[in-house]
Amino acid sequence: MSEHLQNMRRHYQRDGLLEAHVPDEPFALLHAWLQQAIECEQAPVEANAMYLASVDAQGLPHCRVVLLKDLAADGLVFYSHYRSAKGCDFAANPQAAATFHWPGLERQVRVEGVVERVTAAESDRYYQSRPLLSRLACWASEQSQPLGSRAELEARLQQIQQQYADNPPERPEDWGGYRLLALRVEFWQGRPGRLHDRINYLKKESGWRRERLAP
Ligand SMILES: Cc1cc2nc3c(=O)[nH]c(=O)nc-3n(C[C@H](O)[C@H](O)[C@H](O)COP(=O)(O)O)c2cc1C
């Protein structure tokens, strides 16, 4: 296995990322790259999947995948349980990092910043747009808590389905959206010979500062 891993080496040659072609602020570029990733045949089906890292009260980092559900102004919106492990991390330390990897485009985007909850109205709107089973599953699952068995979870869902057979439930108070407000956004484009392009944006009081980073 180690030999196989050591010999896995992809030659990146699709594209470049030059200052002449990037905007003064990062979100227009992030929009464009996300759109291209969604359209790109080789990209994974879930182009909006991002690796989300949080840090707990002891300083230990935790990383998992969540889905980007809105990209607005300087913020990345995703939905989760507020009492999940990540929810507890954000309560103790409202900072996060998110990474997209779009292998079909040989691209990575890293976003770092501060996390806040979206408004209850915004969470309600998104919750109501979800399929019924997903809405009920929010009630059935205490995300990140230990479960005795799979059967326990299924029984809990069945009970919720019976309870709300006639009128589907409102959004649970402890489920909703977070917005990651970007303070740093870095675009990475793979290039031949590992001389990749990295364009980094840093949020300053006066606006975004742009710089090139060594690969
Ligand atoms: C493709 C994919 C998409 C996911 N999307 C979400 C999501 O949008 N929200 C969410 O809470 N968990 C999502 N998950 C599950 C999380 O990765 C994770 O298991 C869950 O949020 C619990 O994480 P925590 O215990 O660190 O809080 C997704 C997992 C995968 C693999």
Image: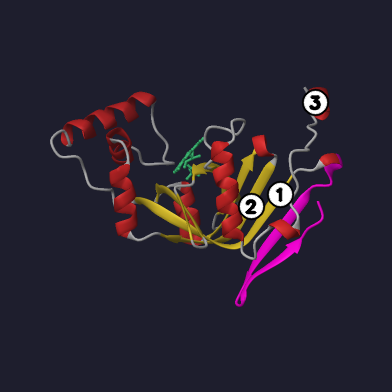
Q: Is residue 18 left or right of residue 153?
A: right
Q: Position of residue 172 (x, y in %)?
A: 28, 48
Residues at marks 2 and 3, CA–CA distance in whole angstroms: 28 Å
Q: Position of residue 11 (x, y in %)?
A: 80, 34
Under circle 1, the secondary element is strand
Q: Say which label, 3 or 1, has the lower sequence index.
A: 3
**The magenta stretch spans which residues?**
193-215
Check whether the beta carbons of the residues at disc 1 and disc 2 lie within 8 A of each other: yes
Q: Residue at x 67, y 63 (%)?
A: 201
Q: Is residue 59 left or right of residue 106?
A: left
Residues at marks 1 and 2, CA–CA distance in whole angstroms: 8 Å
Q: Residue at x 30, y 51 (%)?
A: 125
Q: Position of residue 213 (x, y in %)?
A: 78, 58
**Residue under label 2:** 110
The residue at the far front in this view is: 20
Please identify, in this view, whether the residue under mark 2 or under mark 3 is nearer the observer: 2
**Residue under label 3:** 2
Q: Residues within 10 Å of mark 1 (few under 14, many from 20)?
A: many
**Residue under label 1:** 188
- The three-letter amino acid code for the residue at tag 3 is Ser
User: In terms of depth relative to the viewer, which is nearer, 104 or 184?
Assistant: 104
Please identify, in this view, whether the residue under mark 3 or under mark 1 is nearer the observer: 1
- For ligand 1, tell me if the residue under mark 3 lies within 8 Å: no
Q: Is residue 93 visible?
A: no
- The three-letter amino acid code for the residue at tag 2 is Arg
Under circle 3, the secondary element is helix
Q: Is residue 182 visible?
A: yes
Q: Position of residue 142 (x, y in %)?
A: 36, 41
- For ligand 1, tell me if the residue under mark 1 lies within 8 Å: no
